Image (cartoon, grey):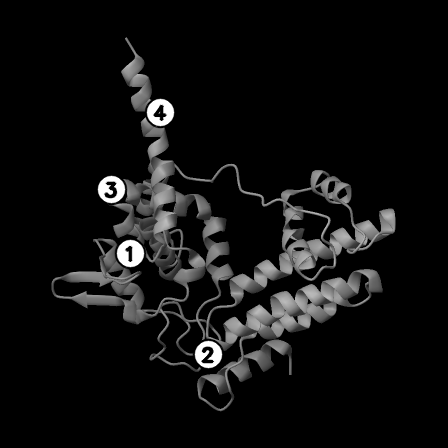
Amino acid sequence: MSSKQAEHLRALLQHHGLLPHRDPYLARFEQWIGAKLDGLPDEVRQPVQHFATWHHLRRIRAKAAGSASTRGPVHSAKQEITETVKFLVWLHETYQRTAATCTQPDIDEWLAGGPTTRSSIRNFFIVARRSRLNTAVTVQHRSAKTSPSLSQDQRLAWIHELLTGTSESIPYRVAGMLLLLYAQPLVKVVTFQTSIIDDADSGMSITLGKHPTNVPEPFASLLREHLVVRPNLRTGAGPDSPWLFPSTVAGRHLHPNTVMDRLRTLGVNLLGARNRAIGELVLECPPSLVAEALGYSTQVAFLHASKAAEPWARYAGRSVRSP
């Protein structure tokens, strides 16, 4: 039996209560750590193993035990571990130094000589400082200088395309609309259940945060059509699947990468679309209300409001000074 067949069988048994639930991302992450450490010199393997197991794995196991999604934490942990391995191998081969004997010039040289992903070693050295492995070096926090965004005209064009075009199937059009209209990240969109939608005589609403939000036409009609023809309902879960976007694997929702790849192939700038959507919404309504409606923190909503207001503030300033 192939690994995919075994995974599908396990999902069916879990869905019907014949096996206990096992977080798929956690299980794969545990296997990934073993493979990542295999063959490394002891000077590299030992500190990375401590970082991977005592910092990341312990935290991710706690999330899994609390039924929280581990996909994002596992992805971040893999990147940090991978970049740490790269750095320590380079340090060992270039200067014959270890994590314990690493110097600040080593850190600075490494960060200056490659892509920005190298800054992912920061958490490793925070842990190293706490454990007294190395208290002599500091990796500064890196913040993005710019935030990608679409223009409002581009956003409206994509909304029109997904509502009226035939370039994609209904599930991916619905997912794209939740991104473009309500600034919902696709990693969150795929976890939505049908219960968040209320289709009453007075109109349709969707609950994304603390209170329901109206769903305007013609998106409401598209959403109704999707609810009737949701795909992947013959994989063991049946028509009673709670997921708005059911997976081919029984009892699970669609993997976010599946949706992301389809919309990226179509040409949608995913992060730009989300930034533009929330930027427009916080200009129309108080940021605190937008945060409650969309499930964002108030800090994030006010940050987008501040960014969205900057061009207007500069324009107003120029207008006052003009003769």
Marks 3 and 4, how far apart at CA: 19 Å
Please tell me in which quadrant of the rendered image residue 84 appears: bottom right
Marks 2 and 3, how far apart at CA: 41 Å
- Residue where numbered disc 2 is placed: 250
Please tell me in which quadrant of the rendered image residue 283 appears: top left
Sort mark 1 into few (<14), some (14-19) or many (20+) by Cα contacts within 10 Å: some
Disc 4 residue type? Arg
- Considering the numbered disc 4 on the image, is that residue within a helix, a strand or a loop? helix
User: Which circle's residue, 2 or 3, is located before the other in the chain?
Assistant: 2
User: Which circle's residue, 2 or 4, is located before the other in the chain?
Assistant: 2
> Which residue shows up at 40% across the image and 51% down it?
167
Q: Which numbered disc, 3 or 4, marks the residue closer to the eye?
A: 4
Marks 2 and 1, how far apart at CA: 32 Å
- Considering the numbered disc 1 on the image, is that residue within a helix, a strand or a loop? helix
> Which residue shows up at 71% across the image and 53% down it?
135
- Considering the numbered disc 3 on the image, is that residue within a helix, a strand or a loop? helix
Residue 5 on image: x %, y %: 59, 80
User: Which circle's residue, 3 or 4, is located before the other in the chain?
Assistant: 3
User: Which circle's residue, 4 or 1, is located before the other in the chain?
Assistant: 1
Disc 2 residue type? Ala
Sort mark 4 into few (<14), some (14-19) or many (20+) by Cα contacts within 10 Å: few
> Which residue shows up at 50% across the image and 82% down it?
21
- Residue where numbered disc 1 is placed: 292
Disc 3 residue type? Glu
Sort mark 3 into few (<14), some (14-19) or many (20+) by Cα contacts within 10 Å: few
Q: Answer yes or no: do the residues labelled 3 and 4 have beta carbons within 8 Å?
A: no
In the displayed structure, would residue 205 be above or below residue 151? below
- Residue where numbered disc 4 is placed: 314
- Residue where numbered disc 3 is placed: 284
Disc 1 residue type? Glu
